[in-house]
Amino acid sequence: MSQPSSRQGLIDYCLRKLGYPVLEVNVDDDQIDDLVDDAIQYFNDRHYDGAARVYLKHKLLPDEKTIVRTGITSSTANSAVGIATVTYQEATNFIQLPDTIIGVNNVFKSDANTISSGMFNIKYQIFLNDLYYYGALDLLNYAMVKTHLEDISRIITPDVQLRFNKKQHRLYLDIDWAMVNENSYIIVDCIRIVDPSDFSAVYNDWWLKRYLTAIIKKQWGQNLIKFNGVQLPGGITMNGERILNDAIREIEELETELKTTYELPPMDMIG
């Protein structure tokens, strides 16, 4: 079937592209399973269709708040010059995220008490002094000023500071937990992989099908290269090196295509 909708369907499709059953593809089933996992992991990490933006909501229970507030460790650095001993403190407790989360963009403020409000808010003061005559402003100028004020507000009253590494699956929040009310919600703006076991359309992705075919072909060539020059009955000679070189070239082309066509560009740094 040219439109695979399952893991085995994808494997069968790739093997047919390599000539099976007319040709015997000398790759073990366990090797193919490993290659499928590698291809899907690469797809999830680099392809823009391999991950999706989601919002996870967690209710902070009273006992959880106590744990994160008390999770502080100290470390000491010594020096023979200058300050002899410096002690640092670090928040070590965290919120565990699902293994499918590979990135965290932001954590939304969960309670109004975490930001200044009323007449002491920086936005209010700037509007009070600069926008005293609203009727003289057109909509474009208002939008530009509002965007500028939001940037200033993020500097003076910054959002939640967070730390996350996808190998740990731990979300560290460097905030004053005393300002967060119990039973309030923490909303995490994050990136989650698109699991093909839940969304079978991944198996039919055009780039993924070609990439898996190429890396299976590479494994086939690596398996045969040790038999180069061995003559089979009928005078047939194996040429695993030719298969390997063709596969390497195809993989390089596909990875270049991924970077230039399907991978999201890096964010610009402006400042």
Image (spheres, rainbow, N blue to C red):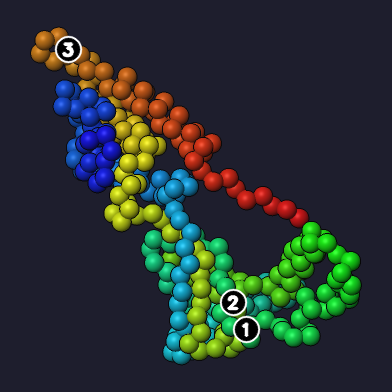
Kindly report the distance in space between the C-alpha atoms of the residues bearing marks 3 and 2. Answer: 70 Å
The crowd level at tag 3 (other Cα within 10 Å; few <14, some 14-19, many 20+) is: few
Figure quadrant of residue 154: bottom right
> Callout 1, which amino acid?
Ala
Which residue is tagged 1? 112
Q: Are marks 2 and 1 in contact (CB under 8 Å)?
A: yes
Residue at position x 67%, y 81% from top?
A: 115
Task: Classify 10 Å Cα crowding around label 1: few (below 14), some (14-19), many (20 and above).
Answer: few
Give the mark toward the camera: 3 or 2. Answer: 2
Which quadrant: the C terminus?
bottom right
What type is the residue that disc 2 sits on?
A: Lys
Q: Secondary structure at mark 1?
A: helix
Q: Which mark is residue 109?
A: 2
**Chain-order first, disc 1 or disc 3:** 1
Q: Residue at x 89, y 75 (%)?
A: 132
Give the residue displayed 57% in from the left and 85% down from the top.
180
* Residue 70 in view, yes or no: no
Residue that numbered label 3 is attached to: 236
Q: Is residue 94 above or below residue 168?
A: below
Q: Where residue 231 sits in the image (x, y, percent)?
A: 16, 14
Q: Is residue 189 above or below residue 11?
A: below
Observer-nearest residue: 142 or 83? 142
Q: Is residue 38 above or below residue 134?
A: above
- Measuring from the top left, give residue 163's x and y in whole percent: 55, 67
